[in-house]
Every structure is written in C-alpha cells, then in structure tokens.
C-alpha cells in the first residue's frame, strides 16, 4: 500500500505513520515530492487489513492507496502520478524532457575506434556514450571485451567529449571497477533477474539502466527495477530491447507495446534499443522513429566506424553517417509528438 500524506502535515505526524508501519513488521520508503510526500509500505501489506484502516484514520494522512500490482516503488502512483527524471552527469532522462540518445559501439575494441565513434556521435547530437567493456557473449569463444582497458578508453573519451559514459557490469565482482569509470551502469538483458547484482546496484547511488530480459514480462521487468530501488537507489531507467518470439526474421521482436504500457504503469524513464531489438541495421532507424513516436524517453543505438569489421554485433550497428541521418529524422518525429531530441 501507499500512504499519501496531506499538504501541511507535520514531521511528528509522518513519524507516527512510519512507526505504525514499522510496528506492523513492514518497512517504509518515503518519497518527498515538491507538492506531496508519499510513503510506500514495503513488505507484504496484503495480509495487514487492520493496518490499512488505522493508517487511514491517522492525522496528516490524506489517503491510503491499495496497490494491486506486486510492485510499489516503481508504480506510477507512488510518485504522485508524475514522471521521474534520472540525471546522468548533467543529462536529464525522462519527465517529458528531451529525447536522450545514447550511442557508441557494441564493444570498445581499440582506442581509435572508440574515440572516432565518440566524436562522431557527439557531433550528431548523442548525449551519452556507450561501449561494452565486459561483454555477455552467447559463445565463450567470442570476443569477451577489453575489460579495464576499455573502461579507461571510455573515461578518456568522456574527458575529451564531455559525454557521460554508460557501460555494462555483468557480475557483482565487476561493480567497483565499473563504477570507478562509468557514469551509468548497464544491467544487460541476460542479467535482468540476477538478483544479487540488482541488489548491489541498489546499494550504490549510481544511475542504472536496466534492460528487459528477452523472455521477461513487463511485470518481471518492473519487479527487477523494484529490487534496485528497494535497496535505496532510485536512479533507474528501463530499456526495452526486444523479446524472443516465434518470429526469426529479426534477432528479437522489439516490443514497442512496452513503451506506452510502461509509461502508464511506472514513473521511471523508458528507453528503447532498436539495434538488439532487430539485429539488422536497416531496421534501426525506422524502429527508432517508431519508438520516439510511441513516447520513449530515449534510445540506445550502436554505432561503429566499420560495422563489417566489428568484433560483436556488426550487422546491427550504424555507421556514423547513418547515425547522423537517423538523428535528423528523429528530430521531425519528436517535434510531431511535442518533444525534442
Ligand atoms: C548491449 O547493450 O551491449 C547488450 C549486450 O545488450 P542486451 O543486454 O540487451 O543483449
Ligand atoms: Mn551489442
């Protein structure tokens, strides 16, 4: 359940509410908005029917909302119906602001490759730089990433271009190293339900991008985000990146339904990754346009100076030239739906 405090409630009233909740063996998660303070009751409150009525009767309580969904902190109601903004450095993601484009190669391969890509995507209007250092590859014999060397190159590119850096941590043991260099931690699709990793990210205050697992439902994605926020880190951005269906023309099926569904269920920003979602570079721009039209808060796009020579995901990466064309086309779509890139 969620307790909405009334305007002008006192600190003592709020403390009385949290004591009542904690006395019932549950935890409180307080969210102080500009207009409203909302207290999320964390734990199994379904069985505490009497708590519901006592909270409703307490001074300073405007209403107590029963939540039917299994998640709370990510629920739109928890945030007073408003969108959350997640800041990565000086870049704001979400809340109807600019459509934020994250771009860069699938993997960091060489210093030259990354620097060249970083300069090109910056010039074309990307706001964040991506690049894999630890790569989750299907085959153990494929290129696994340059690890710390890649992180150092990413940090150098950030210093030169000013673009904050997003990169993946696949394991709790990689977290310290990744946090030392990256501005945003990516939890990859394969790790969406790696609960120890989610909890570890939750214990930091680093912005996190949580990608949807290829076989995960929207509810499972939201519950994975709930793990991070329940540990105390509210800076979570979701990313739809395609799910596995019977269709095998594309690498995955990009579930654009997820965008308006997520926007209605949660206050968290929603990104779309049309590269992994399709696996084909020719489909990336059309699906990027569609994602913006559907209301996505941003995109994550793979860009490589020579996709045919890429060590991972070559067929789905845009050249810098095609990335620039995509950005120009996105401008028009964004304007049509009252947004800007
Ligand atoms: C990636 O973004 O580099 C990646 C591996 O994506 P996903 O986890 O969605 O497969
Ligand atoms: Mn990739």
Image (spheres, grey):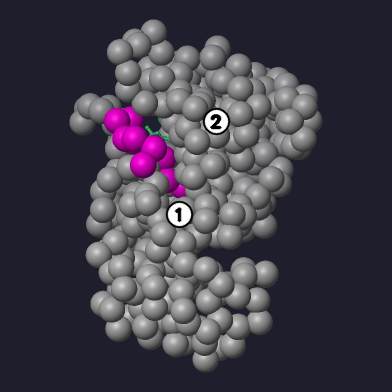
Element carrying mark 2 = strand
Q: Is residue 207 magenta?
A: no
How many C-alpha atoms fall within 10 Å of the one at disc 1: few (<14), some, or many (≥20)? many
Question: Does residue 246 sit above or below 221 in this rendering?
Answer: above
Task: Name the image quarter holding residue 10.
Answer: bottom right
Q: Which residues are magenta?
A: 209-219
Q: Is residue 218 magenta?
A: yes
Residue drawn 54% across and 38% down? 271
Residue drawn 35% across and 67% down? 42
In this view, the mark in front (1 or 2): 1
Element carrying mark 1 = loop
Q: Position of residue 60 (x, y in %)?
A: 56, 81
Report if the beta carbon of the residue with label 1 is closer than 8 angstroms to ligand 1: no
Residue topped by disc 1: 74
The CA span between labels 1 and 2 is: 25 Å
Task: Name the image quarter holding residue 1.
Answer: bottom left
Q: Single out the residue that lies furthest toward the left.
A: 140
Q: Quadrant of the C terminus?
A: top right
Residue drawn 33% across and 80% down? 22
Q: Position of residue 248 (x, y in %)?
A: 34, 10
Residue topped by disc 2: 301
Disc on the earlier residue, 1 or 2: 1
């Amino acid at each position: 359940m969620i307790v909405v405090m009334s305007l002008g409630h006192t600190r003592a009233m709020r403390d009385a509410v949290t004591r009542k909740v904690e006395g019932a063996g549950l935890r409180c998660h307080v969210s102080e908005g500009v207009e409203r303070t909302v207290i999320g009751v964390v734990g199994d409150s379904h069985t505490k029917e009497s708590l519901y009525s006592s909270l409703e009767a307490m001074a300073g309580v405007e209403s107590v909302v029963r939540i039917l969904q299994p998640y709370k902190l990510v629920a739109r109601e928890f945030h007073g119906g408003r969108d959350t903004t997640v800041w990565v450095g000086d870049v704001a993601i979400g809340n109807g602001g600019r459509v934020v484009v994250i771009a860069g190669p699938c993997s960091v391969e060489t210093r030259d490759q990354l620097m060249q890509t970083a300069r090109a995507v910056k010039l074309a209007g990307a706001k964040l730089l991506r690049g894999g250092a630890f790569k989750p590859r299907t085959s153990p014999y494929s290129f696994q990433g340059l690890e710390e060397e890649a992180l150092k190159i990413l940090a150098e590119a950030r210093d030169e271009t000013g673009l904050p850096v997003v990169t993946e941590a696949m394991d709790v043991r990689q977290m310290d190293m990744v946090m030392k260099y990256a501005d945003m931690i990516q939890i990859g699709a394969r790790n969406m339900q790696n609960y120890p990793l989610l909890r570890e990210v939750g214990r930091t205050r680093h912005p996190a991008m949580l990608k949807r697992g290829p076989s995960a439902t929207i509810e499972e994605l939201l519950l994975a985000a709930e793990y991070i926020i329940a540990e105390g880190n509210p800076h979570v951005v979701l990313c739809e990146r395609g799910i596995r269906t019977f269709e095998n023309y594309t690498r995955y099926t990009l579930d654009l339904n997820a965008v308006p569904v997520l926007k209605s269920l949660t206050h968290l920003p929603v990104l779309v990754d049309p590269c992994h979602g399709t696996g084909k570079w020719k489909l990336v721009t059309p699906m990027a346009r569609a994602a913006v039209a559907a209301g996505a808060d941003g995109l994550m796009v793979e860009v490589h100076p020579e996709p045919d020579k890429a060590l991972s995901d070559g067929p789905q990466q845009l050249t810098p030239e095609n990335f620039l064309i995509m950005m120009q086309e996105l401008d028009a779509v964004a304007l049509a739906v009252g947004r800007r890139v």
